[in-house]
Image (cartoon, rainbow, N blue to C red):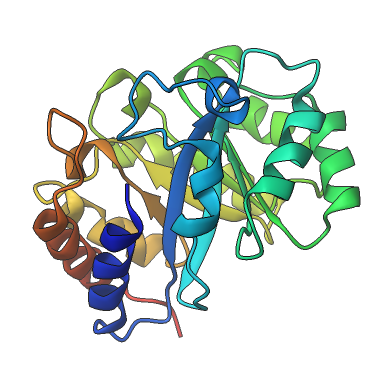
């Protein structure tokens, strides 16, 4: 991802006249955090480039999507990224299966205004036995630390989003935590975005996340594909009044 690509996509997004925000999600891991060359530089930019990638624009939500094998120092890693990411950084999407609640609570206490999105991917679903009640109970262990959760039931395994499967999870979490933001993911793209239109009517404030379907096999963003996806997404999920 480059700042030129961000600007091109943002310029088009603002012509769509939606009240939704465009997430600028930048991937990072422990390797890039400490200055080591990333395995896939098109997806994982060098850490010092975070500042240039995040625009100063109210139409964007500027997040670092972070993963790490070292959970013992996760809080320190998050603080280091917060310092390096610049003034327009707005929070994290934690691509970690159920990080320690104490870590997210400590970060929330230190940085109360940042977004903290807890990704619930394939391994996280397995740990709660793919049960909506157990998942909601697990989310409850985090108190008010996460502002949002992202349900990615099969996407991390390369499978298509299954709307029917996700409905019970959203209903259970929403009934227990009415103020938490909920996002969904799972190979959303030009050929599948239309599938979420009826879902948006049931859960109008749901957010969506996509990445792999908007890249080439070499990892480059396909800007024309991204622009069309945004148009289709805004149409499929109009912002609720």
| Residue at the image point whose x is 73% and y is 17% from the top | 71
Check the image and report above or below for 180 versus 219.
below
Check the image and report above or below for 48 versus 10.
above
Query: In this view of the protein, which residue sits in the foreground, 210 or 3?
Result: 3
Q: Is residue 137 visible?
A: yes
Query: In this view of the protein, which residue sits in the foreground, 99 or 69?
Result: 69
| Residue at the image point whose x is 13% and y is 28% from the top | 217
Left or right of residue 74: residue 226:
left
Check the image and report above or below for 37 versus 33.
above
Question: Where does residue 224 sit, x and y in percent of width and height?
Answer: 10, 59
- The mark total stands at 0
| Residue at the image point whose x is 49% and y is 60% from the top | 54
Question: Where does residue 55 sit, x and y in percent of width and height?
Answer: 48, 68
Left or right of residue 228: residue 5:
right
Query: In this view of the protein, which residue sits in the foreground, 27 or 195?
Result: 27
Left or right of residue 157: residue 140:
right
Left or right of residue 74: residue 129:
left
| Residue at the image point whose x is 80% and y is 20% from the top | 73
Question: Where does residue 74 sit, x and y in percent of width and height?
Answer: 75, 25
Question: Where does residue 75 sit, x and y in percent of width and height?
Answer: 80, 31
Q: Is residue 142 visible?
A: no
């Amino acid at each position: 991802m480059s700042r030129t690509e961000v600007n091109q996509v943002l310029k088009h997004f603002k012509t769509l006249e939606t009240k939704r925000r465009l997430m600028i999600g930048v991937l990072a891991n422990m390797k890039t955090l400490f200055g080591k060359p990333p395995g896939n530089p098109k997806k994982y930019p060098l850490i010092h480039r975070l500042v240039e990638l995040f625009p100063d624009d109210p139409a964007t939500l500027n997040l670092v999507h972070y993963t790490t094998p070292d959970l013992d120092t996760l809080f320190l890693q998050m603080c280091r990224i917060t310092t390096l990411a610049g003034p327009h950084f707005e929070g994290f999407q934690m691509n970690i299966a159920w990080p320690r609640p104490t870590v997210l609570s400590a970060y929330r206490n230190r940085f109360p205004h940042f977004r903290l999105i807890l990704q619930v991917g394939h391994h996280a679903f397995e740990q709660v036995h793919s049960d909506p009640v157990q998942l909601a109970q697990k989310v409850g262990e985090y108190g008010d630390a996460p502002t949002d959760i992202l349900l990615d039931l099969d996407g991390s395994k390369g499978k298509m989003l299954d709307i029917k499967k996700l409905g019970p999870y959203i209903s259970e979490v929403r009934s227990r935590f009415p103020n938490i933001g909920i996002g969904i993911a799972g190979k959303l793209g030009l050929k599948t975005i239309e599938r979420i239109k009826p879902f948006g009517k049931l859960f109008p404030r749901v957010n969506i996340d996509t990445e792999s379907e908007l890249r080439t096999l070499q990892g480059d963003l396909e800007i024309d594909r991204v622009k069309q996806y945004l148009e289709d997404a805004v149409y499929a999920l109009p912002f609720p009044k």
